[in-house]
C-alpha cells in the first residue's frame, strides 16, 4: 500500500473512534448496558447483581486497556530503562474499586449505576479476591506494583497465574477445613489472555496480562502472569506411536505446573513442583524480557542500561543461574562478562529473618530437574569462594557460612546466598534485621479504597488531597491532634467503621455486637458460602459499639503468638469471673477479634484456631461476663476482609517473638487507619515507635538482643503464676478437649517455650492494662489515634519505590502524556 493511502486509512480509522472513552454518566450507563447485552450476553432488561458486576467490570476494563495501550506505546517510543519485578506471589485482592479509584471516576460510576437501579458497593461485593499469595510478601508485591504505576515508572510485574489461589478457610465446629479457591470459575474480567505471547519452557507458558492503573496519572503498567499450557510439541512421540489417549492425558499434566499456590508461607523446602514452578515463571519472564530488549538492541553490553530485575524474596533467584545460562550458552558471552552483567541487573528483597525460613534446594533435586543450572551455581560458588579467600584467608567457618552450597545430611543450595553473591543491592524488610533500605509496605491508595470517611477527614483538615500522592504531607495532621472538632469527626468516622465491622461479624457468627443491625445487609449474601447450618451456635448478645474492638488478623503461626492473645483473653475472662459487681463496672468492654489461616499441614496452628473457638464458645455464653468480653474468630481472612476489619479496629495486636517477624506489613495498615498498636519490638514496630513515639503505642516483651540469652536459660525460665494458671485451665479441660490441647500446652511449658510466651506474659498483660487505661480517656485515645495516622507517611510503599528507583535500579519516571 502506498504511504499516502495508508495515512488516509489510519486517519479514517481514528475518525471512527472517540479519542478517549467518555466518562459522563450517560456514556457509562450505555457502556454497562452494552456489556450486559454483548459481553455477558444477558438481556439489558433483565440481569442480576452478578451480571451487572460483570458488565461493570468490563466497562472499567475498557478504560484500563485504553490507558495501558497508551502507556506501552509511550514506553516503546521512549525506550527507558525498565524495572522488572519478579515475584512468585501477588496478593491483589479485588480490582474493581481500586481501578475506578485510580482512574478517578468512582463518583461517575456510582451515579451511572444509581440511574440503572444498582448500588456500586453492592456490586463491588460480587467480586472475589485474587489471592495468588500467602501473606505479607505477596501483599507487598501488590502494593509495590500500585506504587510503580502511580509514580510513572516504566515497570513490569511477572508472576504465576495459579489456577487455584490460596485455599479458602471454612470453619466447621471450630476446626479449620480447606477448600480450593476456584477463583477463575466465573471468568476474570481483569485479565487479558495473550495466546500469541507464549514461550516454551518444556511446556508452553502463556501470558495473561493484568493492567495496573496508577493513581492520578494516565500510566497503567502491566502485571504479566504465566499459565502453563500443553505445548504443540509436547509428547508428539505418543501421538505418532498411536498412543492417543495417553498423549492427551500427558498434555493435561503439563498444566499442573501453574495449578496451585503452595499454601505454606514459611517453608517450601525440597518440593519438586515448587522448583518447577519457580523455573517455569523465571524462564518465561526472562525470555520475554530478552525478546523486548532485542527488539531494539543487539549488544548485551547495553543490557544493564535497559534492564533492572528485582526479585521478591529468594523464590525467583534461580533467575540468576538462568541469566548466566542464557548469556553464556546462548549468547556466547564469556563468563566474567556475563557475571558482570548479572551483578549489575539484579536486586533482591529478603523477607525471612530466621535461618529456618531461608529457602534451600537439595542438590540432588536441582541436579535432576535443572542439571545445567546446578553446574552454573557450582561455578558461581567456586569463584565466590576464591574471591572470599582473598579477604578472609583460611577462615573456613566463615567461608562455609557464606558458601552457596550447604554441606550436611542433605546437601543443599542456599538460595539467599546465591542472591547475596550476585545482587548489587540487597534490601531487608525492616531495620531490626538488616541495616540497609527498609521495605515499606502499604500503599496510600489503600485507605482511599477501604476507609473513604477517614480520607475525607484528612483531606479536609489538610486542605488538600495531595497527601494521597505525596507521602510527607500527612504529618500535617499532627498540628490538629488536640483539636476538639477533629476529635469529634474522627470518633464519628471510627464509629461508622465499627458499625460496618459489627454488622459483618454479626452476619458471620450471630454474635450480636451492636444494636439495630439491618439484616438486609449485603454481607449476608456475600457470606452465605462460609456459613454452615450449625455455625450460628452463639446466642445473640448486646455489646455496645463503645467496646474496644481489639484485633489480631494475620496468618496463624507459633511465632506470631496468637496463642499469647488467647491466653490473655482467658486471663481476662478469669479475672471478670472473680470480680464483684463494683469491680465489673470498671472493666473496659472488649470485642476480641482473631482471624487468619493456618497452613494445611501445620497442626499446632490448627489447634490454636480450635482453642480460639472453644474459648469463644465458653466466654460468649457465660452470663457472668455479659457485655464485658466477646471473642470472635473471622474465617477466611483475605485482602477484602482486611479492608473491612482494619478501619473498624481500635487496637491491633502484633505479638511476634522479637527477631522473628521480617517486617509485619499488617501493622502499617492499622497504623494508617488510626488503630493503636500493641506490639513487641519486632519488625517494623521498632521504626513505627521511632516515628510516632513509643508513648503512642503499647510496646512489651523481650527485645531482639535478649531473646538468645533467654532461650539459653531454657528450663530455668519460669513464666509468671498468672501464665501457669491460664495454661492449667486449658490443660485441665476447662474449655473441653483436654487431650487434644495437651500437646499445644506442652509447646509453651516445661522448657519447651521456644517463642517465650511464658516469659513475655506478664509484660503482655501490663501492656493490655495500659491499653484499657488509655481507652477510658477517649480524648487521649483519639489523640493517639490521630498521631498514629499522622506518623504513617514514612511507611508508604511509594517512598520505598522512590528509594529503590534511585538507589538500586537507576530508573527514571516515564509519564505518558494525556
Ligand atoms: N494477609 C493479608 C490478607 C494482608 O492484607 C496482610 C497485610 O496487609 C497480611 C496477610 C500480612 O499481615 P502481617 O504482616 O500482620 O502478618
Image: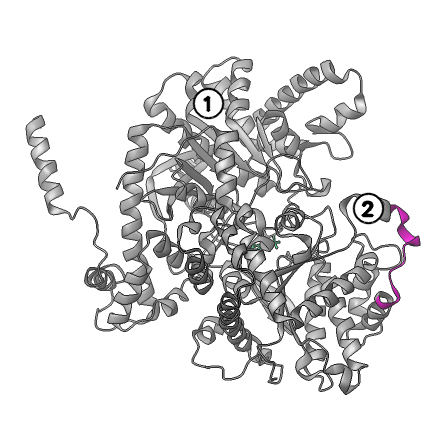
Looking at the rendered structure, the secondary structure element under dot 1 is helix
Region in magenta: 711-722
Percent of width and height locating residue 216: 35, 48
Q: Quadrant of the N terminus?
A: top left
Name the side, left or right, on which 669 lies relative to 214.
right
Reading the image, the residue beneath label 1 is 304
Q: Is the stretch drawn in magenta largely helix, strand or loop?
A: helix
Q: How is the image coloured?
A: one colour
Percent of width and height locating residue 39: 25, 59
In the image, residue 811 above or below residue 71:
above
Q: Quadrant of ligand 1?
A: bottom right
Residue drawn at point x = 65 percent, y = 70 percent:
775
Picture quarter containing residue 552? Answer: bottom right
Reading the image, the residue beneath label 2 is 706
Name the side, left or right, on which 159 lies relative to 589.
left
Residue drawn at point x = 63 percent, y = 47 percent:
663
Amino acid at each position: 500500500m502506498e504511504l499516502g493511502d495508508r495515512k488516509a486509512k489510519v486517519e479514517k480509522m481514528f475518525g471512527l473512534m472517540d479519542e478517549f472513552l467518555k466518562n459522563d454518566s450517560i456514556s457509562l450507563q450505555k457502556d454497562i448496558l452494552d456489556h450486559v447485552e454483548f459481553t455477558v450476553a444477558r438481556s439489558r432488561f433483565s440481569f442480576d447483581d452478578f451480571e451487572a458486576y460483570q458488565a461493570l467490570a468490563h466497562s472499567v476494563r475498557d478504560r484500563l486497556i485504553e490507558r495501558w495501550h497508551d502507556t506501552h506505546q509511550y514506553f516503546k517510543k521512549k525506550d527507558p530503562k525498565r524495572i522488572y519485578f519478579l515475584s512468585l506471589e501477588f496478593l491483589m485482592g479485588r480490582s474493581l474499586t481500586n481501578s475506578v479509584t485510580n482512574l478517578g471516576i468512582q463518583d461517575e460510576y456510582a451515579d451511572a449505576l444509581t440511574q440503572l437501579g444498582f448500588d456500586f458497593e453492592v456490586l463491588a461485593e460480587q467480586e472475589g479476591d485474587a489471592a495468588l499469595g500467602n501473606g505479607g510478601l505477596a501483599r507487598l508485591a501488590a502494593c509495590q506494583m500500585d506504587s510503580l504505576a502511580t509514580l510513572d515508572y516504566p515497570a513490569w510485574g511477572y508472576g504465576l497465574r495459579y489456577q487455584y489461589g490460596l485455599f479458602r478457610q471454612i470453619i466447621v465446629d471450630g476446626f479449620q477445613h480447606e477448600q480450593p479457591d476456584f477463583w477463575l470459575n466465573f471468568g476474570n474480567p481483569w485479565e487479558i489472555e495473550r495466546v500469541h505471547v507464549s514461550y516454551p519452557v518444556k511446556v508452553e507458558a502463556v501470558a495473561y496480562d493484568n493492567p495496573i492503573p496508577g493513581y492520578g496519572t494516565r500510566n497503567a503498567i502491566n502485571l504479566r502472569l504465566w499459565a502453563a499450557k500443553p505445548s504443540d510439541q509436547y509428547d508428539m512421540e505418543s501421538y505418532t506411536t498411536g498412543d492417543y489417549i495417553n498423549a492427551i492425558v500427558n498434555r493435561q499434566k503439563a498444566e499442573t505446573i501453574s495449578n496451585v499456590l503452595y499454601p505454606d508461607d514459611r517453608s517450601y523446602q525440597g518440593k519438586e513442583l515448587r522448583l518447577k514452578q519457580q523455573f517455569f515463571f523465571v524462564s518465561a519472564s526472562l525470555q520475554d524480557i530478552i525478546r523486548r530488549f532485542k527488539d531494539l538492541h543487539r549488544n548485551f553490553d547495553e543490557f544493564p542500561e535497559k534492564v533492572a530485575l528485582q526479585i521478591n524474596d529468594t523464590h525467583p533467584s534461580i533467575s540468576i543461574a538462568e541469566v548466566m545460562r542464557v548469556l553464556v550458552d546462548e549468547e556466547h558471552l564469556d563468563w566474567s562478562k556475563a557475571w558482570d552483567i548479572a551483578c549489575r541487573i539484579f536486586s533482591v528483597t529478603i523477607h525471612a529473618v530466621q535461618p529456618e525460613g531461608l529457602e534451600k534446594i537439595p542438590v540432588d533435586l536441582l541436579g535432576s530437574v535443572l542439571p545445567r543450572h546446578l553446574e552454573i551455581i557450582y561455578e558461581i560458588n567456586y569463584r565466590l569462594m576464591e574471591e572470599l579467600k582473598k579477604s578472609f584467608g583460611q577462615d573456613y567457618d566463615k567461608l562455609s557460612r557464606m558458601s552457596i552450597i550447604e554441606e550436611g545430611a542433605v546437601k543443599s543450595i542456599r538460595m539467599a546466598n546465591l542472591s547475596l553473591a550476585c545482587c548489587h543491592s540487597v534490601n531487608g524488610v525492616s531495620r531490626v534485621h538488616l541495616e540497609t533500605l527498609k521495605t515499606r509496605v502499604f500503599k496510600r491508595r489503600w485507605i482511599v479504597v477501604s476507609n473513604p470517611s477517614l480520607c475525607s477527614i484528612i483531606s479536609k483538615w489538610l486542605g488538600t488531597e495531595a497527601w494521597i500522592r505525596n507521602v510527607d504531607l500527612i504529618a500535617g495532621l499532627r498540628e490538629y491532634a488536640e483539636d476538639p472538632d477533629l476529635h469529634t469527626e474522627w470518633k464519628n468516622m471510627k464509629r461508622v467503621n465499627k458499625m460496618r465491622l459489627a454488622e459483618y461479624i454479626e452476619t458471620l457468627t450471630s454474635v450480636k455486637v451492636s444494636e439495630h443491625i439491618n439484616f438486609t445487609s449485603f454481607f449476608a449474601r456475600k457470606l452465605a458460602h462460609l456459613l454452615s447450618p450449625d455455625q450460628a451456635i452463639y446466642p445473640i448478645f448486646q455489646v455496645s459499639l463503645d467496646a474496644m474492638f481489639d484485633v489480631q488478623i494475620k496468618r496463624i503461626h507459633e511465632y506470631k503468638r496468637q496463642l499469647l492473645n488467647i491466653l490473655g483473653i482467658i486471663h481476662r475472662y478469669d479475672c471478670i469471673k472473680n470480680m464483684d459487681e463494683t469491680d465489673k463496672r470498671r472493666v473496659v468492654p472488649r470485642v476480641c477479634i482473631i482471624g487468619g489461616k493456618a497452613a494445611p499441614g501445620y497442626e499446632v496452628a490448627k489447634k490454636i484456631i480450635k482453642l480460639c473457638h472453644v474459648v469463644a464458645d465458653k466466654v460468649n455464653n457465660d452470663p457472668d461476663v455479659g457485655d464485658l468480653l466477646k471473642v470472635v474468630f473471622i474465617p477466611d481472612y483475605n485482602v477484602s476482609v482486611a479492608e473491612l476489619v482494619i478501619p473498624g479496629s481500635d487496637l491491633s495486636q502484633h505479638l511476634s517473638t522479637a527477631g522473628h517477624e521480617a517486617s509485619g506489613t499488617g501493622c502499617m495498615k492499622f497504623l494508617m487507619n488510626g488503630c493503636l498498636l500493641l506490639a513487641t519490638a519486632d519488625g517494623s514496630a521498632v521504626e513505627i515507635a521511632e516515628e510516632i513515639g513509643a508513648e503512642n503505642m503499647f510496646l512489651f516483651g523481650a527485645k531482639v538482643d535478649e531473646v538468645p540469652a533467654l532461650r539459653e536459660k531454657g528450663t530455668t525460665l519460669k513464666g509468671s503464676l498468672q501464665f501457669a494458671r491460664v495454661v492449667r485451665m486449658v490443660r485441665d479441660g476447662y474449655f473441653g478437649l483436654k487431650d487434644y490441647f495437651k500437646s499445644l500446652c506442652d509447646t509453651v511449658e516445661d522448657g519447651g517455650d521456644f517463642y517465650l510466651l511464658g516469659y513475655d506474659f506478664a509484660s503482655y498483660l501490663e501492656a493490655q492494662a495500659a491499653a484499657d487505661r488509655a481507652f477510658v480517656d477517649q480524648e487521649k485515645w483519639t489523640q493517639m489515634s490521630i498521631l498514629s495516622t499522622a506518623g504513617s507517611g514514612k511507611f508508604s510503599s511509594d517512598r520505598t519505590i522512590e528509594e529503590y528507583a534511585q538507589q538500586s535500579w537507576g530508573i527514571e519516571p516515564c509519564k505518558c502524556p494525556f
